[in-house]
Amino acid sequence: MTAPGSSTDTMARYYIKKAGLGPRDINIVPVGSGAPGMVALEAKNIDALVYFDPIATMLCAQEGRRAAVRRAHPRRL
């Protein structure tokens, strides 16, 4: 997620709870927006990333990466 209280923080917490996980299971780390998150993921400093496009699409285009959850505006699907 980008920062505490951000929309990506809200999304992360929603999907963590939906998966039946809690604070003891997950460590949420703010990585900022844009390149810092991509670098943290590529360096394996984090295991997952909650981002919006274009970063999400760029990451999914890389070999071995996939979106666990992909949401888009219905007109864009």
Image (tube, rainbow, N blue to C red):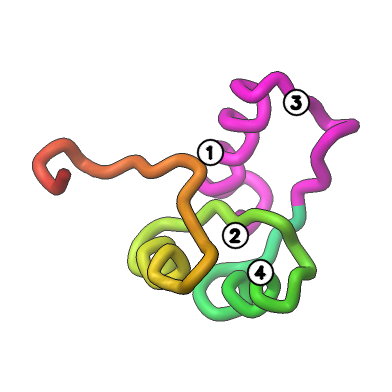
Tags 4 and 3 touching, CB below 8 Å: no
Query: If you read the primary sequence from the N terminus, does the residue marked by circle 3 or circle 1 appear first?
Result: 1
Q: Residue furthest left?
A: 75
Residue 16 highlighted magenta (yes or no): yes
Q: Mark 4–mark 2 contact, CB under 8 Å?
A: no
Of marks 3 and 2, the one in the foreground = 3
Q: Amino acid at mark 3?
A: Leu
Which type of secondary structure does the marked residue at label 4 adopt?
Answer: helix
Tag 4 residue: 41
Instruction: Determine the CA span between mark 4 and mark 3.
Output: 21 Å
Query: Image point 60% across, 56% down: which residue?
Result: 49
Number of residues whose C-alpha sits closer than 10 Å to that of mark 3, classed few (under 14), some (14–19) or many (20 or more): few
Residue 2 image point, x, y percent: 60, 59
Which tag is nearer the camera, tag 4 or tag 2?
Answer: 4
Q: CA distance from mark 3 to mark 1?
A: 14 Å
On screen, residue 68 versus residue 2, left or right, reads left
Residue plotted at (35% across, 62% down): 53
State the residue position of label 3.
Answer: 21
Q: Tag 2 or tag 1, which sits nearer the N-term?
A: 2
Q: Nearer the viewer, residue 26 or 3?
A: 26
- Residue 71 screen position, x and y as percent: 34, 41
The residue singled out by tag 1 in the image is 11
User: Secondary structure beneath disc 2?
Assistant: loop
Using the rendered view, name the quadrant where residue 21 is placed: top right
The region drawn magenta spans 1-28
Mark 3–mark 2 Cα distance, whole angstroms, equals 20 Å
Give the Cα separation between the discs numbered 1 and 2.
11 Å
- Depth check: give the residue in front, 72 or 30: 72
Please identify the residue farthest to the right as the structure is shown. 24
Where is residue 47 shown, x and y percent of the image? Answer: 72, 57
